[in-house]
Amino acid sequence: MGTAYGDWLREQREAAGMTQQQLADAAVMTRSHIAHIEAGRRIPSKEDARRLDQALNTGNVLSSFLPKDDSAIADHFAVARELEQQATMIREFGFSLVPGILQTERYMRAVMQTAFPPWSEEECDRLVVTRLERAKILDDSVTPVVWAMLDEAVLRRPVGGPEVMADQIMHIVRRVESGRVRVHVLPFGLGAHPLMQGMMTLLWFEDQPPAAYTEGMQTGKVIDSPVMVERLQGTYDLALGDALSLQDSLALMRATAKEYGHHD
């Protein structure tokens, strides 16, 4: 497991009498990346593990016992939230729902009402507060850079009813018009596209390798593998090439909000 591997790395580092910063310097990594690995939030690449073995003089132990699957990391949702707060660039894809950091409170509550087993009012309140806190990263005028790609189904599915949807879509429009986020819509007319399998988030950082987060039915997965992250980045770029332009996406969102009853 990621946590067990992290504990093992910490034990090896402490046995060598090294601080996280000293190990980071010796392994040509950043201290924050070492901290994430030790806490079980990240799994090192094979190259990182090789350099850690060299720095700690542990032969190929850390390389040999890399977890085979980064799904071993516990509580993916909490890890993803933490990584989101540290990112310098975030690229979202929403297949059936608006990505969390762009949701309005009423849209959130409408989604939460579909949960099974049903959530209590207290649970919903707590989750709404958490999600609204996440969205505060957009209060900064520059960082992180946020792009979102939305399947047209996201706009057409009347989550919470027409009024909630009109408000939700115009919330996104206002974010785009302020220059804070960039949004592209993948139109229905496109048919099949590379991202049809579900929701995805790509994250870049100033001082650690990029990561991805995918989400499905009551599951989530943080992906650290450089090969897999690069493949997901390529998939995102491929789909983006077929999406509507920013201006055409804005026009479609405005027209859809109007269909739901929004009036300028």
Image: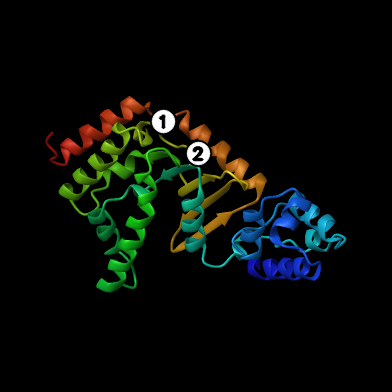
Image quarter (top left, top right, bottom left or bottom right) of the N terminus: bottom right
Q: Quadrant of the C terminus?
A: top left
Residue 84 position (above or below residue 186): below
- At horizontal 49% and vertical 57% (from top left) the residue drawn is 82
The residue under the point 71% across, 68% down is 10
Mark 1: which amino acid?
Ala
The structure residue drawn at horizontal position 40% and vertical position 40%, both measured from the top left corner, is 148
Q: Residue at position x 22%, y 33% from top?
A: 254
- Percent across and percent down for residue 144 are 45, 42
Q: Residues within 10 Å of mark 2 (few under 14, many from 20)?
A: some
The residues tagged by marks 1 and 2 sit, at their Cα atoms, a distance apart of 11 Å
| Residue 41: percent from left, percent from top | 59, 61
Helix, strand or loop at mark 1: loop
Give the residue at mark 2: 194
Give the colouring mode of the picture. Answer: rainbow
Q: Is residue 13 at least partly visible in the picture?
A: yes
In the picture provided, is 94 more to the left or to the right than 82?
left
Q: Is residue 120 visible?
A: no
Residue type at mark 2: give it: Pro
User: In this view of the protein, which residue sits in the foreground, 220 or 62?
Assistant: 62
157 or 2, which lies in front? 2
Crowding at dot 1, Cα within 10 Å, few <14 / some 14-19 / many 20+, comes out as many
Q: Which label lies toward us, 1 or 2? A: 1
Residue 11: image x %, image y %? 74, 71
Camera-side residue of 192 and 72: 72
Location of mark 1 (residue): 243
Residue 163 on image: x %, y %: 15, 48
- Rendering quarter of residue 132: bottom left
Upstream in sequence: badge 1 or badge 2: 2
SS of the residue under disc 2: loop
